[in-house]
Amino acid sequence: AQTVTQSQPEMSVQEAETVTLSCTYDTSENNYYLFWYKQPPSRQMILVIRQEAYKQQNATENRFSVNFQKAAKSFSLKISDSQLGDTAMYFCFCAGGGSEKLVFGKGTKLTVNP
Amino acid sequence: DAGVIQSPRHEVTEMGQEVTLRCKPISGHDYLFWYRQTMMRGLELLIYFNNNVPIDDSGMPEDRFSAKMPNASFSTLKIQPSEPRDSAVYFCASSWQGPTYEQYFGPGTRLTVT
């Protein structure tokens, strides 16, 4: 069965600094996709970044980037120049291309301090 | 587009009552997902549809839960009879190209069963 593990229940960072959130996963799929979603206090789930497993290049979206280590089944999210609006729960998500179930990690609560 | 619309936003009901949650996906999206979020279990996929047909319902907890998608613009999640352990936030999401692409989430329905 597909699993996603986020080992950091909570993290905090000072505004303008850089923080890295960890995610490890396990899947039997050869073709799969990894995501980071953000859930601010408003409860709205928002896509942060998406990575296709067959692409070696790490995905980047403005201040957000990932470190995708396929052999280690690791998919960490780096947030640069942290802003107060980045305060949220961050969920790692794995979607297989076949019959594996779609799975979210338990989340990491990130607080950006002024 | 108004995004994914869910109703009601909040529902309080007594144990044993029937509860119906509603979702309108984004127009043109062929995939619709129902998730449940609790503190203990995190975000869990309950069921998803493609072109109104259920594809994976392995996450539906038990026979008390049922989901339908009678047309491309409407889906329901019904719990009958409801129990206190069903208390959670239920999210509906839709996607244009499937679970390996971005899912757009609704605001969620907070269900409290007393």
Image (cartoon, rainbow, N blue to C red):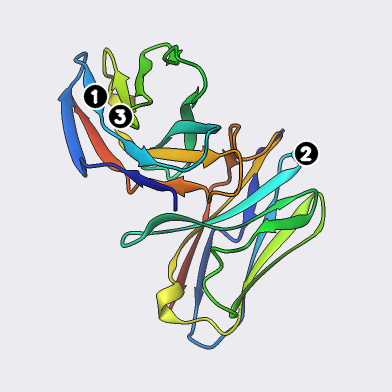
State left or right for residue B54 relative to residue A26: right
Identified by mark 1, the residue type is Thr
Please state which of the two labelled residues, at mark 1 or mark 2, is closer to the viewer: 1
Dot 3 amino acid type: Ala
* Residue that carries the numbered disc 3 in the rendered image: A72
Residue shown at 18%/35% (left/top)? A11
Considering every residue shown, the one lying at the far right of the view is B71
Please rate how many residues cluster around mark 3, counting C-alpha atoms within 10 Å: few if below 14, some from 14 to 19, many from 20: few
Q: Position of residue B53 (x, y in %)?
A: 78, 56
Q: Is residue A13 visible?
A: yes
Per the model, the C-alpha gap separating discs 3 and 1 is 17 Å
Q: Which residue is mark 2?
A: B27
In this rendering, would B78 be left or right of A108?
right
The answer for how far apart the CA atoms under marks 3 and 2 are is 39 Å
Mark 1: few/some/many CA within 10 Å (<14, 14-19, 20+): some
Give the quadrant of the C terminus of chain A. top left
